[in-house]
């Protein structure tokens, strides 16, 4: 990505803080040209999956339980079908299974296999390729997935095709206006790029390719006839699992990780006073 236009507002994309980073000249959308390698053994070798699970499970399970309650209030019919795109270990499927008929899609073959061993209905592959042409769902959810997709326009078109009438599209993803992200940007501008690279998950199997705000994503979705109905902030970072979150990417510099950990603790004390680094947006098709 050397040039081009913003998928949200059509503005010019210009080079940002690093050679792989780009930002819109007209809105707060940001992008990268980092290369995904979801089934790359070399990239997976740099991730400690046990630490990753310890880092993320508690906060994800809490957020997913809350999200299921919200969706259940909006969609009370227990026979509603729900598709979880990029379901990973299946934690959201587990939370939603008591309220909906659930199906998950996971492109990481090893993780998908682990989820199926837990008895979860998970298909290996990519959205929408593993769906039948006529399959429709009452709810389609992307939990920390949409920001990793190379072709967000195509993904939204596919969502439109596979949503049932009066269905809901729900995007749970990082917030470009979040406190941690803005601090990482500031540090990168001052020359310490480590936190910024980590926010984009550089060097991990599925790096971030986009950073949106609620405003920029609403503009993008509107171009595909989705109208934002509701938005919420959720916790992106908690003390529980924080050390494992700093460490799971295979860092060998313990001192640097201690500094990052302590810095994150300081930011957490101010987190309630600033925008969260995670948002959930609820869309209806028109």
Image (cartoon, helix red, strand yellow):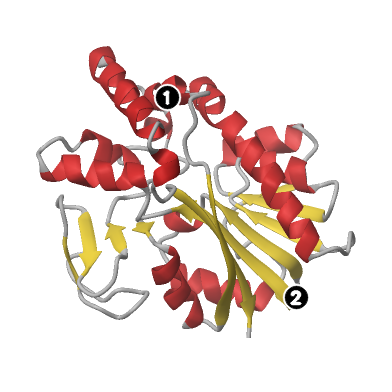
Residue bearing the label numbered 1: 248
Inspect this view and state whether residue 231 appears: yes
Left or right of 92 in this view: 12: left
Of the two numbered discs 2 and 1 in the rendering, the one whose residue sits closer to the viewer: 1
Q: Nearer the viewer, residue 183 or 203?
A: 183
Tell me if mark 1 has few (under 14), some (14-19) or many (20+) residues whose alpha carbon lies within 10 angstroms of its own.
some
Residue positioned 29% across, 51% down in the render: 34
Provide the secondary structure element on which disc 1 rests: loop
Residue 171 horizontal/vertical position (percent): 56, 60
In the image, residue 282 lies at what x, y percent?
A: 61, 66
**Residue 230: image location, x then y, percent:** 60, 67
Which residue is denoted by mark 2 in the rendering? 134
Can you say whether 178 is above or below 4 in the image? above
Q: Which numbered circle lies on residue 51?
A: none
Earlier sequence position, callout 2 versus callout 1 = 2
Q: Nearer the viewer, residue 102 or 11?
A: 11
Crowd class of label 2 (few under 14; some 14 to 19; many from 20; radius 10 Å): few
The residue positioned farthest toward the top in the image shown: 254
Q: Residue at x 26, y 42 (%)?
A: 183
Q: Image quadrant of residue 268? A: top left
Taking the image as shown, residue 231 lies to the left or right of residue 99, namely left
Q: Nearer the viewer, residue 118 or 62?
A: 62
- Dots 2 and 1: beta carbons under 8 Å? no
Q: Is residue 197 above or below residue 74?
A: above
């Amino acid at each position: 990505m050397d040039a081009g236009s913003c998928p949200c507002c059509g503005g010019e994309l210009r080079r940002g803080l690093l050679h792989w980073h780009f930002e819109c000249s007209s809105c707060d959308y940001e992008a990268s040209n980092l290369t995904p390698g979801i089934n790359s053994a070399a990239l997976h070798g740099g991730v400690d999956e046990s630490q990753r699970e310890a880092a993320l499970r508690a906060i994800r399970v809490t957020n997913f339980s809350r999200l299921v309650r919200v969706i259940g209030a909006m969609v009370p019919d227990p026979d509603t079908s729900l598709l979880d795109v990029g379901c990973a270990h299946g934690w959201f499927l587990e939370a939603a299974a008591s309220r909906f008929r659930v199906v998950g899609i996971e492109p990481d073959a090893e993780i998908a296999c682990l989820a199926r061993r837990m008895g979860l209905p998970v298909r290996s592959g990519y959205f929408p390729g593993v769906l039948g042409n006529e399959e429709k769902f009452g709810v389609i959810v992307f939990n920390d997935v949409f920001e990793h997709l190379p072709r967000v326009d195509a993904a939204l078109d596919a969502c439109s095709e596979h949503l049932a009438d009066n269905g809901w599209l729900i995007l749970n993803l990082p917030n470009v206006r979040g406190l941690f992200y803005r601090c990482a940007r500031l540090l990168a501008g001052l020359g310490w790029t480590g936190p910024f690279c980590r926010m984009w998950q550089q060097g991990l199997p599925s790096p971030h390719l986009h950073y949106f705000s609620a405003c920029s994503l609403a503009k993008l979705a509107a171009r595909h006839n989705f109208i934002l109905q509701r938005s919420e902030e959720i916790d992106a970072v908690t003390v529980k699992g924080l050390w494992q979150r700093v460490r799971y990417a295979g860092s060998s510099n313990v001192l640097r990780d201690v500094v990052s950990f302590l810095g994150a603790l300081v930011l957490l004390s101010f987190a309630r006073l600033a925008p969260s680094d995670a948002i959930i947006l609820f869309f209806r098709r028109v």
